[in-house]
Amino acid sequence: MPRTLLSYLLLFIFTSSYTLSQGVIQKKTLAVLEFDGTGVPDQTMQDVTDRFAKEYGSFKKDQFTIINRAQMRKTLQEQNLRVYGCSSFNCGIEAGKALDVDYIVIGSLIKNGPVYSLKSQLIDVKRSKTISRADYDNIIGDIISIMSKEVKKAAAYLASAKIEVEFVENKVEETQRKLIILPVEITLDQSFEQEKITSLMNEWIRGEVTFSKKAKLVDFEIEKKIMGKEEFKNGVMSNQVAKNIGLQNDVTHVITWTLRITKLESSFILNHFSIV
């Protein structure tokens, strides 16, 4: 699994790392402008934009209020601003100020023969700067697959960008999540060294968690000691057992994984749950 894909998973696992001592999170406002299309029908571009807004909203619903798209179009029309074809930085800033939002997303989809190019950009309107870009070139496929894959990936990537969070009264206490990583099931062909593979898998996932900066990990020696027990040589076999082990080690979250590599199948499954 590539780092970016697992990083998106960790983004969903740890959507927030704060609790408030006093006050509440001040949500930011965001508008997704109509993506500009070249070689793509207008109705299709509206569908692409709607899909992007929906996906982005699902990732950041606790941090952003995404303004109603019909109201957005009406406001831009009333101020004689472009509703469609606004894919440049300056146009995005102008529209963002007219809509009085904190952030704005602009984008475009270009079709050249059978090949598509999708570009999107998250802009901080107040500071007039680009926060993040997600560009995908040389896309082969139909528009349905592009909306289900590339549009979703672009929304996830922009959603992963770090945004400054403001709190009413600015009083906040960070909550540190403590995490343990355990194998649920390990089924390997005899050509694999199971003990070595188990340790390497846990090391790899730990590295990704550390990279995400979303949680504190238990000492690796604790995980190795658990995995070294005879009864757990093929995994802890259930999430309930993993939960009990987590409680014994004073953690708040557990990531479990299942690895099967045989002559007939090859699969890797990640799961996460809170135990507090």
Image (cartoon, rainbow, N blue to C red):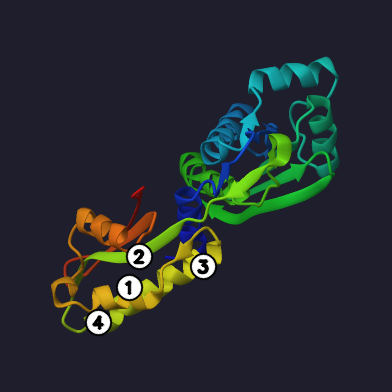
Q: Which dot marks residue 223? A: 1
Secondary structure under the numbered disc 4 in the rendered image: helix
Q: Could you tell me if the residues under marks 1 and 2 are in contact, i.e. CB atoms within 8 Å? A: yes
Q: Could you tell me if the residues under marks 4 and 1 are in contact, i.e. CB atoms within 8 Å? A: no
- Distance of label 3 from label 2 (alpha carbons): 12 Å
Q: Amino acid at mark 2?
A: Ile
From the viewer's side, name the closer residue of 115 and 262. Answer: 262
**Residue named by callout 3:** 210
Specify which label sits upstream in the sequence, 4 or 1. 4
Q: Amino acid at mark 1?
A: Glu
Q: Residue 44's x, y, as percent?
A: 57, 31
Foreground mark, 4 or 1?
1
Foreground mark, 1 or 3?
1
- Distance of label 1 from label 2 (alpha carbons): 7 Å
Secondary structure under the numbered disc 2 in the rendered image: strand
* Residue occupying image coordinates x 75% and y 26%: 83
From the viewer's side, name the closer residue of 20 and 14. Answer: 20
Mark 1 crowd level (few <14, some 14–19, many ≥20, 10 Å Cα): some
Mark 4 crowd level (few <14, some 14–19, many ≥20, 10 Å Cα): few
Q: Which dot marks residue 195? A: 4
Q: Residue 71's x, y, as percent?
A: 69, 17
- Distance of label 4 from label 3 (alpha carbons): 23 Å
Is residue 154 placed above or below 50 in the rendered structure?
below
Q: Amino acid at mark 4?
A: Glu
Secondary structure under the numbered disc 3 in the rendered image: helix
Specify which label sits upstream in the sequence, 1 or 2. 2
